Image (cartoon, rainbow, N blue to C red):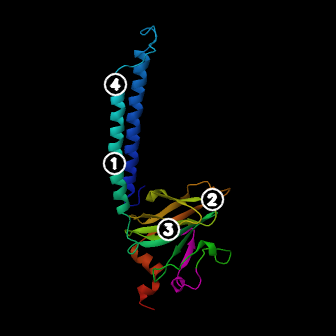
Amino acid sequence: MVASEHGHRIDNLIWYVHLLMGILFVGWLCFFIFTLIRFRESKVEKADYTGVKGHTSSYVEAGVAAIEALLLIGFAVPIWNATVSEFPDPATAENIHIVGKQYAWIGRYPGVDRQFAKQDFRLADKENQYGVVLDDPSGKDDFAVTGEIKVPVNRDVICHVSSMDVIHSFCIRAMRVTQDATPGLRIPTSFKPVREGKYAIQCAQLCGAGHSRMAGVLNVVSEEEFDAWVRPEEMTGND
């Protein structure tokens, strides 16, 4: 099932890559069979140790290099640039800190003010597991949930992925999202859910004896339900 706006493009890209690999496989297989028949012992009784005297092979190599350059410069770089430029604006998207921890997924939300408290991973300890700057007023309404991450439908979501211990990998197959969670780093990844429902969150990186238990749920709800949950003061008009 595809539940994100960009999911079909990911699937199409995978099909294109498999199609290209299939064409290359058949092409090289045909060439291999041709060489077996063309240079079999019954047809070529004596080997020629001089080798090829013409420049055909050089032209072929130059042609292959030109095609590879065309694929890189004409297709790969523009597609990569277009993908990067489509990254949603953090000012309008829903920003969530996703933290991997043996063996659970934690989601941190910025609350009503839409601003996270400043963090410094060097401050992290048992009492301050997220490394939050405790005197930062932006963090007074921040809150965290474990296991079930709630997001709104039809709205861009940016997940800032990190880890508390070892390398994990934040994977939501229905959203076609996979991003490594690395200690000391916060790496953004984005998606736009287009279907309400609950979807599995998995760890796609072997992270210890409890790796198989490191699962969570992405709960995609209506925009009204999400806003009432994450910013109830705004919905009621109370300060």
Q: Give the residue type that dot 1 points to.
A: Ile
Question: Which residue corresponds to mark 4?
Answer: 55
Camera-nearest residue between 113 and 71: 71
Image quadrant in which the N terminus is located: bottom left
Q: Give the residue type that dot 4 points to.
A: His
The mark nearer the N terminus, 2 or 4, is 4
The image shows residue 124 at horizontal and vertical percentages of: 64, 74
Displayed quadrant of residue 206: bottom right
Q: Is residue 141 magenta?
A: yes
Q: Nearer the viewer, mark 4 or mark 1?
A: 4
The image shows residue 68 at horizontal and vertical percentages of: 36, 41
Q: Give the residue type that dot 3 points to.
A: His
The mark nearer the N terminus, 2 or 3, is 3
Q: Nearer the viewer, mark 1 or mark 3?
A: 1
> Which residue in the rendered view is the most extreme toward the bottom?
239
Q: CA distance from mark 1 to mark 3?
A: 30 Å
Q: CA distance from mark 2 to mark 1?
A: 43 Å
Q: Find out whether the residues at labels 2 and 1 contact each other: C-beta distance under 8 Å.
A: no
Q: CA distance from mark 4 to mark 1?
A: 27 Å
Which stretch did the figure color magenta?
Answer: 133-148
Residue at 40 percent across and 53 percent down: it is 10
Q: CA distance from mark 2 to mark 4?
A: 60 Å
Q: Find out whether the residues at labels 4 and 3 contact each other: C-beta distance under 8 Å.
A: no
* Label 1: element kind: helix
Displayed quadrant of residue 88: bottom left
Question: Which residue corresponds to mark 3?
Answer: 160
Query: Residue 213: which numbered mark, if any?
Result: 2
The image shows residue 61 at horizontal and vertical percentages of: 37, 32
